[in-house]
Image: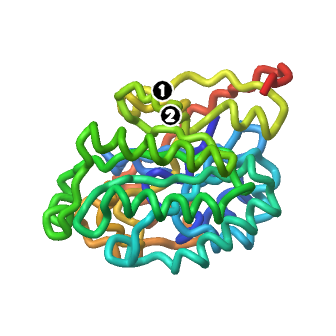
């Protein structure tokens, strides 16, 4: 089983003590986002976890890496964008984020760090030329710290529509997106990185852009030396290249306040986050035996026992 922590919220930044406790105790509980009274018990023992993907926009807390993480294969997807506090009000200054990224790469090795430059959006404040200049600066500062940069373009959701209108945010037209990628690919290559597109339906290979596998068995194989055979994650969008994983996060619990975020659905996030108890098996709240039903989540092993060719 591969564990995702998490597409739904920034666990490494906001809830790292909880994750550490869950890894120590060997399990966590996850509410079904569509039926919150259905709860899955996810096995987090090292023998059950083939790998874990940590998703974050602020890697600074990971400088105090939980010792229990050393027992399982993991890598970090770290988002560093061109945007300022106008769009990402809850994040530290970019120099602090970049310094933490570099420090983690020095400690863990660049194979455990993946740079995400996403979502790419245009606005009066963020033009194509702005993206090129800021991408070039970020890529230079992250040279030698990662071998991959994952990009995607803004997708609109009901929960982001108001911010998009207020700030003039929009997804670039296909021709503008391709013009931007033509500029970004050689910059990334000059700093030792490939550019990979996340959940983009268009074939961008002619531009030198690979299809992203954000949850990537091949990366785990590079880390462990053992090949994994993992099916595609059919719960994601059709264009998503991710392998199957179990997400242990919860929506409406991220306090970064990013204007483009799909994971906060308009509920009172502060109130939701206040339900967090680091000692609870659930990220938010506790089990109510009167209405909640807890079942074991499937934990298939994808290990092949074969030496990886990666």
Quadrant of the image occupied by residue 82? bottom left
- Quadrant where the C terminus lies? top right
Determine whether the residue tagged by mark 2 lies in a helix, strand or loop.
strand
Q: Image point 62% across, 35% down: which residue?
A: 216
Quadrant of the image occupied by residue 64? bottom right
- Quadrant where the N terminus lies? top right
Q: Does 185 sit above or below residue 255?
A: above
Q: Image point 72% across, 71% down: which residue?
A: 63
Quadrant of the image occupied by residue 124? bottom left
193 to the left or right of 236 = right
Q: Are marks 2 and 1 in contact (CB under 8 Å)?
A: yes
Q: Does 284 sit above or below residue 184?
A: below
36 to the left or right of 79 = left
Q: Does 143 sit above or below residue 217?
A: below
- In percent of width and height, residue 95 lies at 59, 77
- Which residue in the protein does label 1 denote? 205
281 to the left or right of 66 = left
Front residue of 127 and 162: 127
Q: Image point 55% across, 55% down: which residue?
A: 55
- Which residue in the protein does label 2 denote? 209
């Amino acid at each position: 089983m591969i564990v995702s922590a998490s597409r739904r919220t920034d666990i490494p930044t906001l809830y790292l003590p909880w994750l550490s406790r869950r890894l120590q105790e060997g399990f966590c509980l996850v509410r079904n986002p569509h039926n919150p009274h259905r709860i899955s018990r996810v096995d987090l023992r090292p023998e059950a976890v083939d790998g874990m993907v940590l998703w974050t926009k602020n890697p600074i807390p990971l400088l105090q890496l939980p010792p229990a993480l050393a027992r399982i294969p993991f890598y970090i997807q770290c988002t560093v964008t061109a945007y300022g506090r106008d769009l990402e009000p809850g994040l530290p200054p970019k120099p602090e984020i970049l310094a933490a990224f570099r420090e983690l790469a020095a400690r863990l090795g660049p194979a455990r760090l993946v740079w995400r430059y996403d979502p790419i959006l245009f606005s009066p404040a963020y033009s194509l030329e702005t993206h090129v200049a800021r991408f070039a600066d970020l890529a230079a500062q992250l040279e030698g710290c990662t071998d991959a940069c994952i990009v995607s373009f803004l997708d609109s959701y009901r929960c982001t529509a108001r911010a998009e209108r207020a700030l003039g945010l929009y997804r670039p037209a296909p021709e503008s997106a391709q013009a931007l990628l033509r500029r970004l690919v050689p910059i990334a290559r000059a700093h030792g990185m490939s550019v990979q597109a996340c959940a983009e339906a268009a074939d961008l290979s002619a531009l030198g852009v690979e299809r992203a596998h954000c949850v990537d068995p091949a990366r785990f194989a590079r880390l462990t030396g053992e090949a994994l055979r993992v099916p595609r994650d059919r719960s994601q969008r059709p264009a998503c290249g991710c392998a199957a994983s179990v997400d242990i996060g919860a929506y409406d619990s991220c306090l970064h306040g990013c204007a483009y975020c799909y994971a906060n659905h308009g509920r009172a996030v502060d109130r939701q986050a206040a339900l967090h108890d680091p000692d609870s098996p659930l990220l938010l709240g506790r089990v109510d035996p009167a209405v909640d039903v807890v079942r074991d989540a499937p934990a298939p092993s994808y290990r092949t026992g074969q030496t990886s060719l990666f």
